[in-house]
Image: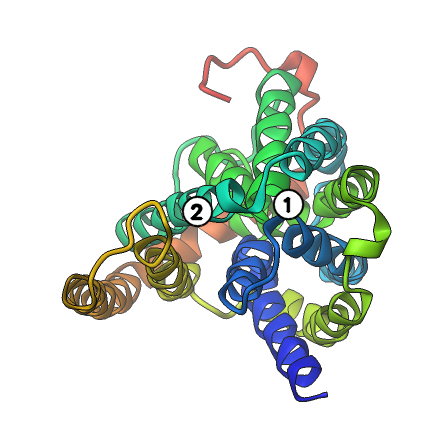
Amino acid sequence: MQKLILLALVGLGAQLVDGSLGMAYGVTSTTLLLAIGTNPAAASATVHLAEIGTTLVSGLSHWRFGNVDWKVVLKIGVPGAVGAFAGAVVLSGISTEVAAPLMAVILLTLGLYVFLRFTFQGLPKGQLGKPLRKRFLTPLGLVGGFVDATGGGGWGPVGTPAILASGRLEPRKTIGSIDTSEFLVAVAASIGFIYGIGSENIDYGWAFALLIGGVIAAPIAAWLVRHIPPRVLGAAVGGVIILTNTRSLLRSDWIDAPDGVRYAVYGVIYVVWAAAIVYSVLQYRKHSSEDAQIIAEAEGIAAAGDTPDDKDKTPANA
């Protein structure tokens, strides 16, 4: 019972982060499941089963608060589901000895990306209000879905920064659309894991505990997305993911580092992490009025009406 309560609290915290940042539910939850010795494929399967419920509630909550662009949801969600199913089948066929450190590497990479992206970059400028095209969203969805299933998380860390970097969709709609489209990814990944490892290898009690915590947090997170600085939250969450998966790698058969080396590495991570959070807070305070103006301008463009993406001839990366 104590473990189930802990898992529910993990699901609640992870969904608060995911719903306000657009990423990190799967990465955070899977990281913690691996830390307590769960099989990598079973950990990812458990998280994705829980995400079917959390993403549904999260998507509805974001929709109610006007945070969803349904065109983006469909353009990225369908290919994301295809990639997630393929990734689940691939992970199911890998041995635990190989999968555990491999997943730690994937999660560490995603954590580094989240950490660096949100610590050192502010909100994008210049392209707000312009539509996102299928030729950008389709491959992004395929890659994001595959990474999400094989890494136990990654839909948000792949999709959210990429769309934010395009500068075409305001942050709250980027987060809301990514969270909503993740429902399709979670369903497809769950089907892939059940096909690959069998339903008897999945702990449904753990999935339900994560689900309960996530469902409670989803509407709160959808409201908080307008108030919590993504820059600060991204630095904080990225640090947790980096520290936890560095620990897993250093203790794995691949490295098996001595205690002195591990503690030295942990110390460096703590110092860099603390400095990054302080820097993120200072940068947020410095640019908060500018960021608010960017968001207000994007909302004004959206209110004026969307431009059909077939008619958008402006050259851009997206």
Q: Is residue 248 left or right of residue 69?
A: left
Position of residue 206 measured from the top left corner of the image (x, y, whole percent): 73, 70
Sequence-wise first label, 2 or 1? 2
> For residue 101, which numbered disc appears in the image?
2
Q: Is residue 245 or residue 169 the one in the foreground?
A: 245
Q: Which residue is mark 1?
A: 178
Crowding at mark 2 (Cα within 10 Å: few <14, some 14-19, many 20+): many
Position of residue 258 measured from the top left corner of the image (x, y, whole percent): 20, 62
Q: Is residue 101 or residue 47 the one in the foreground?
A: 101
What residue sits 78% from the left and 41% below the top? Answer: 184
- Helix, strand or loop at label 1? It is helix
Q: Is residue 303 or residue 48 the one in the foreground?
A: 48
Question: Residue 287 lies in what quarter of the image?
Answer: bottom left
Kindly report which numbered mark, 2 or 1, lies closer to the viewer in this rendering.
2
Indicate whether 314 appears above or below 190.
Answer: above
- The span from disc 2 to disc 1 (Cα, nearest Å) is 27 Å
Labels 2 and 1 touching (C-beta < 8 A): no
